[in-house]
Image: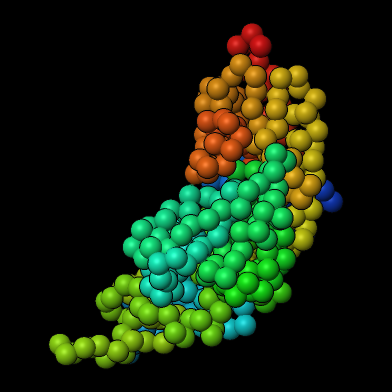
């Protein structure tokens, strides 16, 4: 029987496998396809061109191995266990937290709370920090937000009498900065900003928006779900108060994510969920709470998912997020140029600064029908409103077809997408 992993070995899996293979990316920035087993399977008897990365990314062997090895060699419940295996599992869990800290360049790992993902992270802020809101206070979001950065604030406003406001966007899919400034006021308590729009790929000027929020006396929360896999993120440079992301968007498992909270804010946040592990003492007369982040991780957490998220972060950092971003930018530019050359195709979201997402419409073909035809060609895209219905209402459309790129995509995937769109036009006679 193999000896259990040491506290460092799980997150080293990506580094070790990288050394075994040598350079993971070729001159064009492509990752070794062997790293992602699912990409080898055919779909509809075709080579899989997986372009639904905005919804979820595929998982490298390093992440799959981290999950397997945790359950095979390291499984135990964490914190306060006196036996060796519990202490070992705790080490792995906290090492994963340190990996998140490094990814975000947070000042300390104790500033990082594990959550189920971005949605839960934003709800956590709404239900803890939001307890202090009063009637007439305001929360400002942008017109391109995902529902998870709208609905939690609506629910909070219903409970407190606060007001949810939103800043307009332009026809290019960029934030109207003048309107954003105009919406900020003395009653603004928090600004919620998508780092990258999941529906358009627009990269927002987060540093400037955070600065404006702070000048108005408001806190700033950044939805980083679509950013962390595509660019270097530095929460200290951004100066944001909260930063949320989901593990499955950065090649990790589903059901795990993280929330960074500025230390000065975290220490005063009230508990969110009650139960084991988030307490210091409990009696029938009352209870006292653990320090953050443990105060917000009630019950047995997703230990294996956290460890595997650490492995995913180690994987992308080994490849280099700058190199990944350059490769995906090349793919987006090639796909954008090719789609613009097809008569009857309309691009939705043409911001000057974008990351990895191409949304479009084809005259005479509903996005769902287009997605179905592309699927017969082995091309996986997303079709619909992308959990951004207010944004779609602004453009006067029910939804779009969305191709989203990742580090394992290459120009063959772009070619398959273009060929599939042309086939759909032929089938529909448009």
Q: Is residue 379 left or right of residue 281?
A: right
Q: Residue furthest right?
A: 27
Image-quadrant location for residue 80: bottom left
Quarter of the image for the N terminus: give it.
bottom left
Residue at the image position 60 percent from the left and 43 percent from the top: 199
Q: Residue furthest top?
A: 429
Q: Is residue 399 left or right of residue 359?
A: left
For the rendered model, the colour scheme is rainbow
Q: Against 113, is 388 above or below? A: above
Res 68 visible:
no
Q: Is residue 338 left or right of residue 346?
A: right
Image-quadrant location for residue 311: bottom right
The image shows residue 194 at horizontal and vertical percentages of 60, 56
Res 259 visible:
yes
Residue at the image position 48 percent from the left and 54 percent from the top: 150
Relative depth, front residue between 283 and 98 = 283
Relative depth, front residue between 134 and 41 = 134
Q: Against 35, is 221 above or below? A: below
Q: Against 348, is 76 above or below? A: below
Residue at the image position 82 percent from the left and 48 percent from the top: 28
């Amino acid at each position: 029987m193999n000896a259990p992993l040491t506290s460092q070995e799980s997150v080293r899996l990506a580094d070790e496998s990288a050394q075994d293979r040598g350079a993971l990316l070729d001159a064009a920035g492509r990752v070794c396809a062997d790293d992602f087993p699912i990409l080898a399977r055919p779909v509809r008897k075709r080579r899989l061109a997986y372009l639904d990365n905005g919804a979820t990314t595929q998982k490298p062997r390093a992440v799959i191995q981290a999950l397997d090895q945790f359950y095979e060699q390291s499984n135990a419940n964490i914190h306060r266990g006196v036996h060796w295996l519990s202490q070992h599992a705790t080490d792995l869990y906290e090492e994963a937290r340190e990996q998140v800290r490094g990814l975000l360049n947070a000042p300390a790992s104790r500033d990082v709370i594990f959550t189920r993902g971005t949605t839960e992270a934003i709800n956590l802020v709404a239900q803890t920090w939001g307890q202090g809101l009063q009637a007439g206070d305001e929360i400002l979001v942008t017109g391109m937000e995902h529902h998870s950065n709208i609905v939690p604030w609506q629910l909070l406003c219903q409970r407190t009498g606060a007001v949810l406001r939103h800043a307009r966007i332009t026809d290019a899919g960029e934030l109207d900065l003048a309107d954003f400034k105009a919406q900020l006021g003395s009653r603004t308590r928090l600004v919620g900003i998508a780092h990258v729009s999941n529906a358009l790929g627009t990269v927002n000027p987060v540093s400037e928006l955070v600065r404006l929020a702070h000048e108005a006396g408001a806190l700033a929360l950044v939805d980083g779900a679509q950013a962390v896999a595509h660019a270097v993120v530095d929460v200290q440079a951004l100066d944001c108060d909260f930063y949320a992301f989901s593990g499955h968007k950065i090649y990790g498992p589903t059901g795990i994510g993280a929330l960074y909270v500025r230390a000065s804010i975290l220490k005063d946040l009230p508990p969110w969920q009650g139960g084991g592990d988030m307490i210091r003492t409990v009696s029938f007369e009352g209870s006292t709470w653990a320090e953050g982040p443990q105060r917000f991780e009630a019950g047995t957490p997703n230990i294996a998912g956290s460890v595997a998220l650490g492995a995913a972060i180690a994987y992308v950092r080994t490849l280099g997020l700058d190199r990944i971003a350059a490769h995906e930018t090349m793919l987006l530019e090639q796909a954008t140029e090719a789609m613009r050359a097809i008569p009857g195709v309309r691009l939705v979201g043409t911001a000057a600064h974008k990351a990895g997402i191409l949304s479009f419409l084809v005259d005479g073909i509903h996005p769902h029908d287009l997605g179905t035809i592309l699927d017969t060609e082995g091309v996986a895209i997303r079709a619909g409103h992308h959990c951004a219905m207010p944004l779609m209402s602004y453009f006067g459309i029910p939804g779009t077809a969305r191709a989203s790129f990742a580090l394992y995509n290459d120009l063959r995937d772009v070619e398959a997408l273009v060929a599939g769109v042309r086939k759909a036009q032929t089938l529909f006679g448009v």
